Image: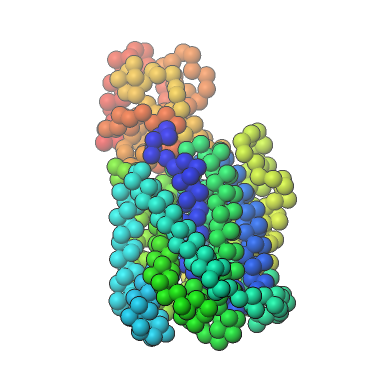
Amino acid sequence: MNGGEGKLGFVSCVALVVGACVGSAIFSLSGLTIFFAGASAILSWIIAAVVFSLYGMLVAELAVRYPDSGGIFIFPKRAFAGRSGAFAGFISGWGYIMSNIVAIGFSAMYIGRYFIAGISRMLSIPIEDVICNGGHFSSSVSALAVAIGLILLVRGGKRSQTVQNVLVILLLATIAVFCTAAFTGGHFHSGSFNDFFGAGILGGTGFLSAVPIALVAYGGAIVVPFLASEISKPHRNIPRSLLYGLLVVAVIYVALVVSILGTLPLDAVRGSETSRLIPLFASIIEGHLSNCSWLVPIVALSGIIALFTTVIMLLRVNARAVQAMAAEGCLPSVFYKENKAGVPYLSMLLMSAVTVIMCFFPEITSRLILMGAVLNVVSMTITSVSLLVSRKRYSSYNGYKAPLGAALPIIVIAIFWLCYMPDIIGGSGEIWLFSAIVYASGLICRFLMRGKDRRMIGGVVVHGKGHGHLHGMPTANLELHPGEEFPEQGVWAVNVYVCGAKYKGMTNVGLRPSDDDSITPTIETYIIGFNQDIYGAAMSLEFVKYIRETRTFASLDELKLQIDKDMTYVI
């Protein structure tokens, strides 16, 4: 995808942040934070917003430094470089993808629950029966939502972006209606605020214990830097959209938490699991909004839209992470492929298939969502360290820089470990077992791929001398990403990954002996069956076979004859 055509602008990026964040977390975890902290849960959501903004600025700088999609893998891969970079990127990317798959399944599962809950309320069926015994119908609704999201994403282009933007606008409108109803008509009661710090079950420090829960709700914000190659003017739009998007999200979260506190008695939150799982519905069913039955379909629609946008955003960023790992030889190359809309459709199809399966096993999905603490903190730590390494190795970089200098990554790492440590240390053995299984399966996959894939390098296509055009064989000149090791000189048969497709090609690495003015080593690739303008595009090369060393030819005819011989090793 080149130029600005079809790329995401500032408004679309803000919509991505809002859509990715305002999903299952606020519609389910808001009640849990109130359960732990009472009214001081408001502080939990504000603190979490500040903490994640720090992490967001850190990731934004990495995205500007390395503007390729699949950032959770790309950032450490490029920053550390070499084998250590490939390993760090794989561990970070694999853990992130696995935890995201569970998050997608969890969000999709709640789409069915909100749909059924809305219908049940309008038909006067006890909501507890629906939530606990929704059965296959609820799972089928969730699976249908995933299928619709997949179709929307695979179509790509401006149309899908427009649909996503409209969904976010509808989401904001429905939330605004709920909050307006809560603050008007005498529905709002201040009793929950009387004991601001002591009303939660964890007492005066409950708001601190609730911060890790609230942090989960902001995690979707990094969808923007992780889709860097899809964003126009990334050096400007990524940092700005992250901060503005997180500000919008924080306002929404605080407004909803305050509305719930004012319309749902704390006794109901403490005494009913349903009130903690779906607090907005509980405010209508057993709270002070009981005379506003017209809010039921609005809340149901709001929840469905929020969860649906979360599903499609996470599917999108997960598919790009899988694609990036496939392009670097860490996963099967088939997952690198894109359709005509520039969408990694096979990666998305894989993610969607796994999500649909998880929708039909809600008990397992609900347990797995609580086990991602180790995976999350490891990925965040590797990403933060990547910025430290990148700044030290590539000090000449003069683009966007996050504030606080070298202190920022250290502060972020310390905060996240403090937040997640209670879950990691105090959690059950299932957390460690789940983490061990995830990383072990990843290492097995990586070991198997090492036997199939060759040396990989990546970079950006830049202008060259234009001699290839004169010889009738136009070549793509590759400028390596910072930290990439220059390959062995010679002529190679390669697989070329560019513009979402895989091609065969022939690469000359080193000087051009037949060009007298060539003094700088180059990496020039002739791509078979390819004729597009790809200047500025990302490209990866997989070295398949060494053909010969470079040498000088006496004439153009002799060069062409040798090229014809070399091509027999490629085709």
Question: In which image quadrant can residue 215 be found?
Answer: bottom right
User: Residue 216 location, x and y as percent?
Assistant: 55, 65
User: Residue 439 location, x and y as percent?
Assistant: 50, 65
Of residues 167 and 389, the one drawn nearer to the viewer in this rendering: 167
Quadrant in which the N terminus is drawn: top left
Question: In which image quadrant can residue 47 be found?
Answer: bottom right
- Seen in the picture, residue 409 relative to 98 is either above or below; the reply is above
**Residue at horizontal 30%, vertical 78%?**
136
User: Residue 109 location, x and y as percent?
Assistant: 39, 71
Q: Does residue 441 show up?
A: no
- Seen in the picture, residue 345 relative to 187 is either above or below; the reply is above
Of residues 353 and 507, the one drawn nearer to the viewer in this rendering: 353
**Residue at horizontal 34%, vertical 12%?**
555
- Seen in the picture, residue 446 relative to 144 is either above or below; the reply is above
Is 139 left, or right, of 264 in this rendering?
A: left
User: Residue 132 location, x and y as percent?
Assistant: 40, 84
**Residue at horizontal 57%, vertical 64%?**
255
Kindly give the residue lying farthest to the front in the view shown. 185
Number of residue marks: 0
- Seen in the picture, residue 129 relative to 239 is either above or below; the reply is below
Of residues 87 and 10, the one drawn nearer to the viewer in this rendering: 10
Colouring mode (rainbow / by chain / secondary structure / one colour): rainbow
Q: Does residue 501 show up?
A: yes
Is 275 left, or right, of 544 in this rendering?
A: right
Question: In which image quadrant can residue 493 be found?
Answer: top left
Quadrant in which the C terminus is drawn: top left
**Residue at horizontal 40%, vertical 42%?**
542
